[in-house]
Image (cartoon, rainbow, N blue to C red):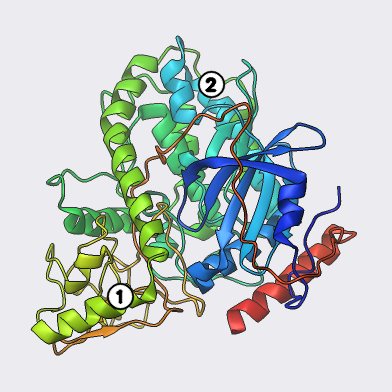
Amino acid sequence: MPFGCVTLGDKKNYNQPSEVTDRYDLGQVIKTEEFCEIFRAKDKTTGKLHTCKKFQKRDGRKVRKAAKNEIGILKMVKHPNILQLVDVFVTRKEYFIFLELATGREVFDWILDQGYYSERDTSNVVRQVLEAVAYLHSLKIVHRNLKLENLVYYNRLKNSKIVISDFHLAKLENGLIKEPCGTPEYLAPEVVGRQRYGRPVDCWAIGVIMYILLSGNPPFYEEVEEDDYENHDKNLFRKILAGDYEFDSPYWDDISQAAKDLVARLMEVEQDQRITAEEAISHEWISGNAASDKNIKDGVCAQIEKNFARAKWKKAVRVTTLMKRLRAPEQSSMAAAQSASATDTATPGAAGGATAAAASGATSVPEGDAAHAAKSDNVAPADRSATPATDGSATPATDGSVTPATDGSITPATDGSVTPATDRSATPATDGRATPATEESTVPTIQSSATLATKAAATPEPAMAQPDSTAPEGATGQAPPSSKGEEAAGYAQESQREEAS
């Protein structure tokens, strides 16, 4: 099927907004993510339903880069366990990405609804994820944000397949990667330690997924006060670096030794010694009969509800706040900066201290500090910047300086570093004066690892959501590249141009 977009590098030709509405009915927003809004869309010709992701270019360079990155990667892949790209439209002010619609539930919800749940069920889920990841790795694609929230059932049939979604952080591995990226609880040690990394980070994340599916607990967990996120993340990163997890009783008492062995091999601290996705598929727990058939539902479900249910609500609130902040007029940030400067009250935030920018709902981080994985949209933590090791080795980010973004993932800066600037918000200077940040600054902010809870039921005849109608005339469709090799080469060149800019 031809795609409704022009070549990614073309800066002159755009689709008309009317081309989108002529072909699709867009319903109301059913989910809001860090960089985009998600709609249910209906093809007017076939009546088939799809998922539509709309990215607003005005939301900044990071949003534009995420959209182009997801389009480029999805054009390269075709696998039964990966949501497929259906159509793309690029107007002057928006990106519209149309994907297959997965009508099934997230894995968490599926487990909770089961009457019987065993290791074999988990093995079936992990096998499908491994097969998809092995395929991506064969194309030298690193997903970089594998987590349970990105795994959904394709439909509600009993034997539905698992599909992987969300490729805006995926990257071609042209040499080792340097920018920190991912979701805190799923980060591999080499990412936390600011080392160069590659495809093994996906295998580590699968190990974390498998650990949670078998026990209902995250492998790295710290009991702290409910809102003491600073100490939580500091201890979390320290434990990840040391590989400090246990198969603790009673949660692992009924789990087979083969399952524990595969988890340990996937979560090997040394990336060179970590099992690959292809090797994991051949493991006896995946391909053999080593997975136990004992019912473990009660224990797993109790821990899932305890560890993840509350975080869903908090995440929904934070994502909604982020989108409002991204789209707030720049003048409001300037006004907040001027007000803070006049009163001279905008000071670099101590741990848990509110900054002057909190009045506009933005997170302010003092210049020179590494932006911390703050779980609140209006709190700036104390200085937690990384300190170089005396032996010249990469210093582990035990101080929490690797900073996750608001969909639970860490968004890399364009130069590969974590930039503690804020987007369209007031940034406190070191002398206490507030100075406005530039529009193109990078904003790493955090969100918990729980799933986004802002779901809405789709209506049979969705209401119309009009794209921006102020685009210039002239746009022609173009089919995707003719071969996977050409697609990979073209996308690699586009990625290099984007990073250079």
Residue extending farthest to the right is 482
Percent coordinates x, y for residue 153 in the rendering: 59, 29
Kindly indicate the quadrant of the structure image that contains residue 277. Answer: top right
Q: Mark 1 or mark 2: name the one nearer the start of the chain.
A: 2
Query: What is the count of numbered marks?
Result: 2
- Residue in the picture at 66% in, 69% down: 92
Residue extending farthest to the bottom is 431
Dot 1 falls on a residue whose secondary structure is helix
- Residue in the picture at 74% in, 32% down: 48
Q: Amino acid at mark 1?
A: Ser
Percent coordinates x, y for residue 101 in the rendering: 65, 36
Residue marked by disc 2: 121
In the drawing, does residue 398 fall left or right of residue 114? Answer: left
- Residue in the picture at 52% in, 48% down: 146
Quadrant where the C terminus sits is bottom right
Identify the mark at residue 333; answer none if there is no mark. 1
Asked if residue 208 is positioned above or below residue 337 in the image, the reply reads above
- Residue in the picture at 30% in, 27% down: 305
Q: Circle 2: is it few (<14), some (14-19), or many (20+) Cα within 10 Å?
A: some
Disc 1/disc 2 C-alpha distance (Å): 50 Å
Dot 2 falls on a residue whose secondary structure is helix
In the drawing, does residue 441 fall left or right of residue 372? Answer: right
Q: Are marks 1 and 2 in contact (CB under 8 Å)?
A: no
Q: Nearer the viewer, residue 49 or 263?
A: 49
The answer to whether residue 190 is seen in the rendering is yes
